[in-house]
Image: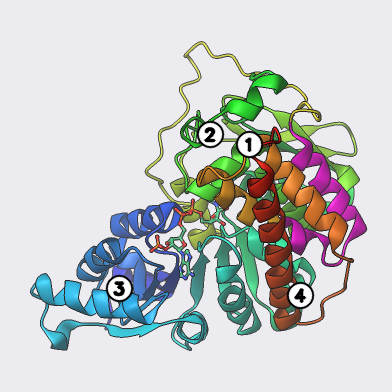
Amino acid sequence: MASATGDKHRHTMKTLTVLGSTGSIGTNTLDVIRRSRHQYRVYALIAGRNIDTLAAQILEFQPKVAVVATSEGLARLSQRLTELGVSKGQWPELYWGDEARIQTATAETVDTVISAIVGVAGLEATYAALRHGKRVGLANKEVLVAGGKLIMDAVRECGAELLPIDSEHNGAHQCLRAGNRSEVCKLILTASGGPFRNTPREELAFVTPERALNHPTWRMGDRITIDSATLMNKGFEVIEACWLFGFSPSQIEVVIHPQSTVHALIEYSDGSVLAQICATDMRMPIQYALTYPERSEAPVPKINWAETRHWEFHAPDPDRFPLLRLAYECQTSGGSATCTLNAADEVAVEAFLEGKIRFPSIFEVVNETLARLPVRWPQTIGEILEIDRESRSVARHLIGDRAQARSYANF
Ligand SMILES: NC(=O)c1ccc[n+]([C@@H]2O[C@H](COP(=O)([O-])OP(=O)(O)OC[C@H]3O[C@@H](n4cnc5c(N)ncnc54)[C@H](OP(=O)(O)O)[C@@H]3O)[C@@H](O)[C@H]2O)c1
């Protein structure tokens, strides 16, 4: 007969696929798992190009399957495992590409998928996991920004569970458990304000990628860090919150809160406001998404209430951060606008990081891409990916044109 502890473990053991295991969210997810090994089995680790980190993760977590982005990456992974002295009999099954990502996200043995790939590369596998009724811990906000309607339809139709890992949405999810949805008036999302919170508008044209990557409170991947500096990230979060919780854009307010300790607030109809407060550590929301509806000890510092502290809240400046306003407009117009917003922004951020355009031009490229493409109403993931490709192509042309003109225009 199994012991009481054995029974408990049998009930709580979760089998996971981690999409984006080598990134910031992925490595934090594996740290949560590392600390509670008896509760989790890692079925698959999915990475892009970071072969060394993936190989180390394979050694430690012994997944059944590992997937990389390209066939060249697969060859490098095989070589790396050989160098590390892992005998072939001990290797996981190794694959590369989109189809393999989908297979690991939908495998029958998997109950929970952590969606932590950056950008639309994670869209198809996340959608497929939801269509198979899995629990998805969602960090990859671009999934909802690009394909919100299809994603939420899949959740409803297939009995899947979508639990937000983005700290603000995770905070809102927690606050919403306190009352009826019909009694909620407003969601308030906080934003750190990024590294240029106090930078005068004239200076923004001269900020370097290094300065923009130096986020004051969070250590994250490059794209989300630049998106935090432009407040595009907060705009994506407004869109994400509309889909996750059924808000209209006008019911969501963004406030700058440089301390990043209050993550979200929910205002109820009687004027009561509930806040979710926690140290800035992504392992808390990741663990919440894994253990919900239960809670357990998390490896996150507790707030010391006896310490003197000063929490500020103020409105963002729409002139210095126009991408936030654009996100509201795109979500209000609906259809493919948010997909184009995400695609154009990703291309513009890349160009900024490569020194091809200046910081304020991220907005200009995104705005102009939106103006050039008609809004459509995609019905399939394939159509979303087509709109994504088209939007990227328009954004790249705009960047190319401007880079050419840069020698004689102040771009
Ligand atoms: N970091 C945070 O604190 C945070 C907070 C809230 C939400 N998010 C969201 O979570 C997502 C991940 O963010 P992050 O900060 O963890 O980003 P990151 O550190 O850049 O990691 C991105 C992950 O995606 C993988 N990847 C990229 N392209 C891929 C492809 N074509 N195929 C397979 N894997 C691919 C990367 O693999 P390789 O490294 O192996 O190339 C890496 O594992 C983003 O959507 C972000 O907005 C992050």
In three-dimensional space, the C-alpha distance between marks 2 and 4, rounded to whole angstroms, equals 33 Å
Q: Is residue 76 above or below residue 215?
A: below
In three-dimensional space, the C-alpha distance between marks 2 and 1, rounded to whole angstroms, equals 9 Å
Q: Is mark 4 on a helix, strand or loop?
A: helix
Mark number, residue 6: 3
- Sequence order check, earlier mark of 2 and 3: 3
In three-dimensional space, the C-alpha distance between marks 2 and 3, rounded to whole angstroms, equals 49 Å
Disc 4 designates what residue?
Answer: 150
Q: What element carries label 2?
A: helix
Camera-nearest residue between 41 and 231: 231
Mark number, residue 359: 1
Check disc 2: other Cα within 10 Å, few if <14, some if 14-19, many if 20+.
Answer: many
Residue 177 visible? The answer is no
Is ligand 1 within 8 Å of the beta carbon of the residue shown at mark 4? Answer: no
- Sequence order check, earlier mark of 3 and 4: 3
Camera-nearest residue between 277 and 169: 169
Residue 180 drawn in magenta: no
Give the magenta-colored segment's residue range: 321-343
Amino acid under disc 1:
Phe
- Sequence order check, earlier mark of 1 and 3: 3
Residue 4 image position (x, y, % from top left) = 32, 70
Q: Which residue is drawn at 15% across and 88% down?
A: 89
Residue 328 drawn in magenta: yes
244 sits left or right of 82 in the view: right
Check disc 4: other Cα within 10 Å, few if <14, some if 14-19, many if 20+.
Answer: some
Q: Do the residues labelled 2 and 1 touch (CB within 8 Å)?
A: yes
Amino acid under disc 3:
Gly
Residue 262 image position (x, y, % from top left) = 62, 32
Is ligand 1 within 8 Å of the beta carbon of the residue shown at mark 2? Answer: no
Q: Do the residues labelled 1 and 4 touch (CB within 8 Å)?
A: no
- Sequence order check, earlier mark of 1 and 4: 4
Residue 279 visible? The answer is yes
